[in-house]
Image (cartoon, helix red, strand yellow):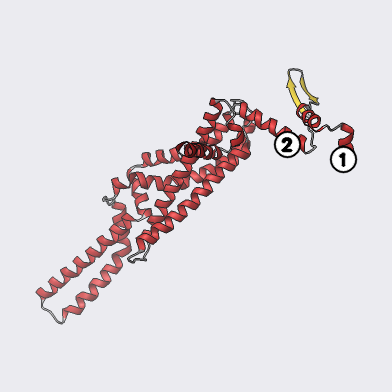
Amino acid sequence: MVKKLFHALKGFVYASAGVDTQLIYDCPLHERRRNLYIGLLVLMVSLLSFISVIYTVYNILEASVIDSKYSDYVNFSIALVTGFIWFLVVFNIYRACLTISGIGDGTSRITSDEIKNAIPQIIMALVLALSLGAPLNILLLHREVNHVVTASDIDRLMQNEESQIKSKAQMLIEAHMDETSNDQMAVSESQVFKELNDNQEELLIQSSQSFMGLLDKIYNQNPLLTLLIFVVAIHLYIVPIFLRMLWVKGVYEFKVEFQNQISLADNGIFKDYYRVNFQGTHTENRFIQAERVMRSRKFTTSEIENQE
């Protein structure tokens, strides 16, 4: 049971790397390992995206005005579903990129043509990395600034609430002027300002605990660390793309080419293969695999032409 589970898990990791599981198991150990590492990298990036989106959506919903006995459960359920959908999106995007992009020119050199072809993938990776970096900053650094209020937060809230505080205080003071003595008026005035200050502190705490408030404070207090986390997120998303550019053609890639030749010949499709040498490029009509299929089926060239 454990072996079957391990085999299924390993097959899922291979599928995450965009390789054919029917061909990879017959390859040498180093071929299987490097494809396994690519699959694990894709899975880790997808899981990080899953966690970051859950944290982001939950904080956004928690900062909303809706409040009930079941709000925490509802918010977490919505965040979990959204995170799972985002996990599938990132996971399948990277599988498609690794499957479609190929391995470049099959050498360990990164050429200008490879970089040009990879520009759309790099742009997409940068966008995904930015969406991962902000939640990671809050997830990793929010404890350091959770109970710290910056001067910018205070100034912003003071400017927003100053006019309302003054008008409300003046109305309450004037209402008590005719009914109370000077001492009582002073007491009521102090109570009014105490109440307004309490409300202001409550608004300040709510603002500091919101998603954007935390992100703003984290950036103000740890700009270099915030930038480092963004760089790490970008690195995680771009690494598989550059690894494909550095990928050296191995046994698995030749087996894929062999399988494609068999499939083409099986469907009566023949291609010209080109060989590059020091004198230049010339056409070499080599249909070795196609001839094998034809001989195994006892087809002749005239029969194929008649079928066409």
Report whether 173 appears left or right of 2. left
Q: Amino acid at mark 2?
A: Ser
State the image coordinates of residue 284 (x, y, percent, origin top left): 80, 24
Q: Alpha-carbon neighbours of circle 1 within 10 Å: few (<14), some, or many (≥20)?
A: few
Q: Residue at x 58, y 29 (%)?
A: 247
Q: Residue at x 56, y 27 (%)?
A: 31
State the image coordinates of residue 35 (x, y, percent, origin top left): 54, 32
State the image coordinates of residue 270 (x, y, percent, origin top left): 79, 34
Q: Is residue 249 visible?
A: no
For this rendering, which residue is in front, 162 or 285? 285
Secondary structure beneath disc 2? Answer: helix
Q: Amino acid at mark 1?
A: Gln
Q: Residue at x 26, y 61 (%)?
A: 202
Report whether 188 appears left or right of 31. left
For this rendering, which residue is in front, 160 or 15? 15
> Which label sits on residue 208?
none
Q: Outermost residue, front direction?
A: 1
Quarter of image, res 177: bottom left
Secondary structure beneath disc 1? Answer: helix
Location of mark 2 (residue): 263
Count the labels in the image.
Answer: 2
Q: Quadrant of the C terminus?
A: top right
Report whether 198 appears left or right of 297. left
Q: Is residue 210 above or below residue 273?
A: below
Mark found first going from the N terminus, 2 or 1? 2
- Alpha carbon distance from label 2 to label 1: 18 Å
Q: Alpha-carbon neighbours of circle 2 within 10 Å: few (<14), some, or many (≥20)?
A: some
State the image coordinates of residue 24 (x, y, percent, origin top left): 59, 32
Q: Is residue 58 above or below residue 28?
A: below
